Image (cartoon, coloured by chain):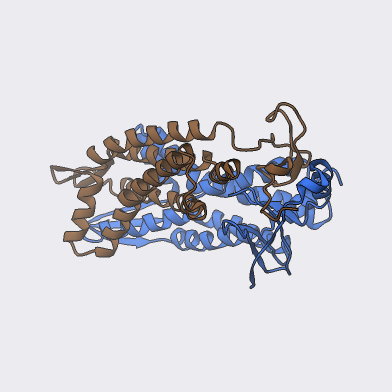
Chain colours: A brown, B blue
Amino acid sequence: MTSRLTSARSVGLVSCHDCRLLVKEDSPAPGAARCPRCGASLHLRKPGSLARTWALLLAAAIMYIPANILPMTITSALGSVQADTIMSGVIYFMHSGSWEIAAVIFIASIFVPIAKLTILIFLLVSVQLRSHWRPKDRTVLYRITELAGRWSMVDVYVVTILVALVKLGAVASIEAGPAAVYFACVVVLTMLAAESFDPRIIWDVIEEDS
Amino acid sequence: MTLENGNPLRGETEDHGNVTNAAALCEAPKRVLACHNCDLLTEVSGPPGSTSLCPRCGAVLYRRKRNCIDRPLAFALCGVMLFAIALTNPFLAMKSGGFVQESTLLTGILELWKQHLYGLGGLVLLTCVAIPLAQLVGLMYILVPLRLQLCAPGSILIFRVIRHLDSWAMMEVFLIGILVALVKLAKMATIIPGIAVVALGLLTIVMTAAMTTLDPPLMWERLDPRR
C-alpha cells in the first residue's frame, strides 16, 4: 500500500471544468463526452493548453509595443494639440504631485502587463522543460496572474471617461488615441492566455516522472 | 470563519484496482473534489462558513456558505435596482467657464462609438454594463424558482455562463478609472459627481456580495437533472 497523494487523473477520473463533478474516464475519445450533470464537454485537461497560451501571449506581446509607443489620448485645448502615451501620463502625474495616481497607472498599465507576460512565459517554459522546481510556488504565481490581470483595464476606462466628459468644442476636447485600442487588446489577450493555461500540467509532469 | 486543509486521498489504487475505487469516488461527489489547480483528490468537510484549502497547492477548494440561496438572491435584486439608478441618473458633470458638460454612464460609450472606436466602445459596454447586468438577471432567473423548490428551464446553461463571465465583469476596475479621471481633470475644470457614481460604487459591493455568497457546488447539486 502506497501513501502518496492521488490525483484524479491517476485513478481514471475527469473533473468537469464547469461543475467539478468527477466522472469516470472510460470513453475512448476524450472531448466527445459530456458531463452528465451540467452538459459541458469533458476534458482531462484544458484542450491545447500550451499551444493556445503561447499563441495568445505572443499576440499580446506584439500588441504591447504599439500600445506604449502610440498616443493613448489626444488633447486639444485652445488650439494646441497634445498627444499623451501611457508613460507620459505617468510622468505628468508624478510632476503634478499626484503620486498615488501615478503609482496606480504605473502598476496597472506597465507593471501588471509585463509581470503577467513574464510569469506566463516562465510557467510555459518550465512545463515544457519538465521542471520539478517548486510546483506549489508556480501554482501560486499562476493564481496571481489570474487575479491581477483585470486591473490593467483601468487606463482604458480612464480614456473612456475623459472622452465622454471633455468635449467642449473649440475650448477643449479629448479624443482616444490608437494606443487605447492596442492596450485593450493586450489586456483581453493576456486574460484569455491566463484562462487557457492549465496549472494542473505543472503537477502532471512531476507525477509522470516519479 | 475557519480555514482548514482538506484531507488528501491516499493512493490505495494498487490494492483495490482502479475501477472499483473510481466508482466509489463517483458515488460521493459531495465530499470528494479534484483541485482545479493541481488535480489532487481531496475530501472536503467542515461546517457552513468554513473554507477548505487544497493540502498540496493551497488553492481554495470549497467555501461553504450559509443561506446560499436567500443571500445571493437578495443581493441580486438589490443590484438590479441599483443598475436602474446608475443607468438613468446623471453620472458626471464638468463645469469649465460658462460651459456645463453633463454625461450619463452610456454617454462615454456612445462617444467612443461616434469616434469609430467600435471595439473599444463595445468592450467597455460589455465589461461594465452588459455582463454584470446579465449576471444579476441570470442569477435571479435561477434563484427565484430554486427558492420555491422549482427549477427554471435552462438554469444549468445559464449558471455555467454566469460562472464563465465572472472574470469579465470589471466594475470595480471602472471605479478606479473614475477616480483617476477625476484627479486628471481636477485642474482643468470642476467635476460634479452625480447620483449614478454613488449607485455604481454601491453596485460594485453588492455585485461582489452576490457572487461570493453563492455556493456553486451546492447549486450544482440542486440543479442536477439526474436527481
Does B79 sit above or below residue A113? Answer: below
For this view, does A110 lie left or right of residue B11?
Answer: left
How far from the left and from the top, in percent, is residue B29? 78, 51
Residue placed most toward the observer, B167 or B108: B167
Q: Residue furthest bottom?
A: B1
* B69 over A63 or under it: above or below: below
The answer to whether residue B89 is visible is no
> Percent position (x, y) of residue B216?
69, 54
Does the image show residue B224?
yes
The image quadrant where one finds the N terminus of chain B is bottom right
Side of B103 relative to A179 (left or right): right
From this viewpoint, which residue is outermost toward the right? B227
Q: Tell me the quarter of the picture where residue B214 sits.
A: bottom right
Residue A4, position as x, y percentages in the image: 67, 54
Q: Nearer the viewer, residue B213 or B117?
A: B213
Rendered location of residue A95, percent (x, y): 16, 60
Q: Give the residue displayed 73% in from the left and 43% down from the top.
A: A11
Would you place residue B21 above or below residue B193 in this image?
Answer: above
Count of picture labels: 0
Could you say which is closer to the camera, residue B16 or residue B22? B16
Residue lying at 57% horizontally and 45% vertically, measured from the top left: B165
Q: Residue at the front extreme? A: A1
